[in-house]
Image: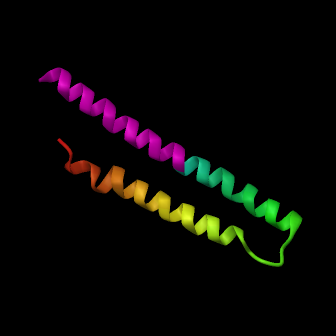
Amino acid sequence: MKTRFNIDTKTNKNLKLGFRIHLLVFLLATPIIFITWYLTDTTYPWPLWSTAAWAVGILFHYLGVFVFGKNKI
């Protein structure tokens, strides 16, 4: 029983770490995408589409780990 608890704790930490890495990559890549857009062609704001889609992915990842992940046994 104690071993199962330790496995569940490690899995929960891995899920949280995965979310934090996902968020960090999002926060680091978004400015690079906007800088690339600004330096190349600013006629159409195409980075807004990728940023919005990625933000929705971050939101669902957060919900899956911190909100709905608490119900797992």
> Camera-side residue: 37 or 16?
37
Given the current orientation, which residue lies at the most extreme left position? Answer: 1
What is the tally of numbered marks visible in this picture? 0
Q: Is residue 11 magenta?
A: yes
Query: Is 38 drawn above or below residue 8 in the view shown?
Result: below
- The N terminus appears in which quarter of the rendering? top left
Task: State the scheme by which the image is colored.
Answer: rainbow
Query: Which image quarter holds the C terminus?
Result: top left
Quadrant housing residue 41: bottom right
Q: Position of residue 15 (x, y in %)?
A: 38, 41
The residue depicted at 72 percent of the width and 58 percent of the height is 31
Q: Is residue 54 left or right of residue 65?
A: right
Q: Which residue is pictured at 60% across the width and 53% down the height?
A: 26
- Quarter of the view holding residue 52: bottom right
- Identity of the residue drawn at 19% across and 28% down: 5
Q: Main secondary structure of the magenta part?
A: helix
Q: Is residue 29 left or right of residue 5?
A: right
Going 36% across and 58% down the picture, which residue do you hit?
A: 63
Residue 39 coordinates in the image, percent (x, y): 88, 64
Q: Position of residue 55 (x, y in %)?
A: 53, 63
Q: Is residue 17 left or right of residue 26?
A: left
Looking at the picture, does residue 11 appear above or below residue 72? Answer: above
Say if 70 sits above or below 54 in the image: above
Q: Position of residue 59 (x, y in %)?
A: 44, 61
Q: Is residue 24 left or right of residue 2?
A: right
Residue sitting at the far bottom: 43
Give the residues in magenta: 1-22
